[in-house]
Image (cartoon, grey):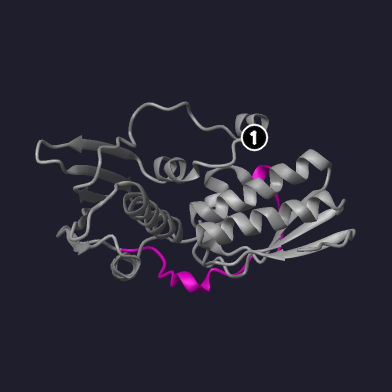
Amino acid sequence: MHVDAKSRQRVTIPFDLTPDKVASLDQFIGSVIKCGVAELVLECAQLTKATSVHIGILWRAYLKAVSTGARVKLVSVGPSLYRILRVLEFDRQMDIDQLLPAAELEDTGRFFRSSTPRSFNSRCSRELESSRMMVRAFRRFIRTLNLSSHDAIDLETVFYEVLTNIRNYAQLKSGDLIEVSAELNRDEIHIVFADPGIEFDPTRPRAEFQITKALKAGQNHGFGLIMIAKMTDNMEYYRYEDGYNVLKLTKKISEETPGA
């Protein structure tokens, strides 16, 4: 693909991205920057629900731009993407403009939880459509809880990231099922993922993520586990003798009004 040198170049970041599309988009952005563009504008309107894949693309674009002295501006940034950028402290490095309204989050103000736990239980296969159905079901469950916008975004993001990691890396066989349960108590929510895939402990000690170190080291991947850790309060992992992995996540629920 030929790219003409311009003082300002706009690139749209799509929501649906296969690994091949990610590689192609990374290559295109790199070619734009190599042409000597002064400012790269990344249009993010399609990222109504951002994932670690999108974060990786944006961060790699930023690293490439920094190496050439080009500026990077993110426009049409929705609440989900902005929340993740803030959690990772990427907002301190990136120029973010044109924030989209948070109406899509269906905020309901300060919420009231009964003492009776509310729960979610579901199973899905390794097939993409099956996992998408589970994600949609969990999103509906979260919406019934009247959580603050930050808590809702964090939980939906974490749920998607864990489920995607299991699908992509657990080496599940045909017929294997991923089982998920969630329970809301008065001030915290517990989510448990169970799968019969290969052993993988996401809780093993890792160096604490720092944006300045990531920038200096040129870190350009692995943001999914970082997002999960930063958007929850506790993670526990168990590997049982029957070959099942069990990951339990706990998140404390805030009493803040949405947007506070």
Instruction: Locate residue 169, reporting x and y percent.
Output: 35, 47
Residue density around tag 1, few if under 14, some if 14–19, many if 20 or more, within 10 Å: few
- Left or right side of 211 for 162: left
Q: Report if residue 106 lies within the magenta region.
A: yes
Say which residue label 1 marks: 218
Q: Which residues are magenta?
A: 91-111
Instruction: Locate residue 31, reporting x and y percent.
Output: 77, 54
In front: 249, or 35?
A: 35
- Left or right side of 114 for 250: right
Q: Residue at x 20, y 63 (%)?
A: 122
Q: Can residue 230 be seen from the camera position used here? A: yes
Taking the view exactly as shown, the residue that stands out farthest to the left is 242
SS at mark 1 in the image: loop
Q: Report if residue 184 lies within the magenta region.
A: no
Q: Can residue 254 be seen from the camera position used here? A: no
Q: Residue at x 65, y 46 (%)?
A: 60
Instruction: Locate residue 30, reporting x and y percent.
Output: 73, 51
Total marks in image: 1
Q: Residue at x 43, y 72 (%)?
A: 106
The quarter holding residue 136 reads bottom left
Q: Name above or below for residue 249 compared with residue 207.
A: below
Q: Residue at x 37, y 26 (%)?
A: 205
Q: Name above or below for residue 127 compared with residue 226.
A: below
In front: 27, or 58?
A: 27
